[in-house]
Image: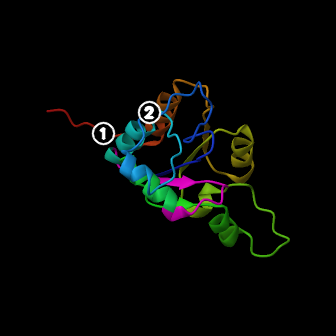
Amino acid sequence: MRISFDLDDTLICYQPDVPSETPPRWIWRCMVANEPLRQGARALMQGLRQRGWEVWIYTTSHRNPSSVWWWLWCHGIRVGRVINQHIHDRHLRRTVRDYPPSKNPRAFGIDLHVDDLEGVRDEGKTHGFRVVVVSPDDPTWTEKVLRVTREMEPRRVSHGN
């Protein structure tokens, strides 16, 4: 299964009261963006990968996908793909008259998207994709994501002997 995460106010939180992961060593910070990764993101994403989830980033920012990929790599997080606004538009806006939703994870084969905006959840209801909304001030945000991913995973049948 494939899960995507938004960046701003979901994984990157500049609010002073939102705890962040320990930054990468100084040498890595010289080569990648020095943005605060929200506390719990590393363990959550590593745990999802261990359970067989493919982790992607889906953002409306114009950050360079390679830069985002390297920034996460320096934090010990491996992602399959980074979709930014440019990639989203190229894939979903066939003409200038096309007005797709701000995000459409289903169009990229993504099963679940994690975002901070209720509006993205509303678009999901309209366009048929699943969204978990986590606010920057929610200290239990990782548990919320884990609960939904567990609900989505196929049940394993145990044949006890």
Q: Residue at x 31, y 45 (%)?
A: 50
Q: What kind of residue is marked 1?
A: Val
Measured in 3D between alpha carbons, the distance from the residue under mark 1 to the one under mark 2, in whole angstroms, is 30 Å
| Callout 2 crowding tier (Cα within 10 Å): few <14, some 14–19, many ≥20 | some
Task: Report the residue marked by disc 2.
Answer: 40
Task: Report the residue marked by disc 1.
Answer: 157
Horizontal side of 27 relative to 120 (left or right) equals left
Horizontal side of 90 relative to 5 (left or right) equals right
First to last magenta residue range: 51-66
Can residue 130 be seen here? The reply is yes
Q: Residue at x 47, y 32 (%)?
A: 39
Can residue 1 be seen here? The reply is no
Observer-nearest of 127 and 74? 74
Observer-nearest of 129 and 143? 143
Residue 21, numbered circle: none
Observer-nearest of 57 and 48? 57
Callout 1 secondary element: loop
- Compared to 46, does 99 lie above or below? below
What number of labels is visible? 2
Q: To which quarter of the image does residue 25 belong?
A: top left
Residue furthest right as drawn: 97
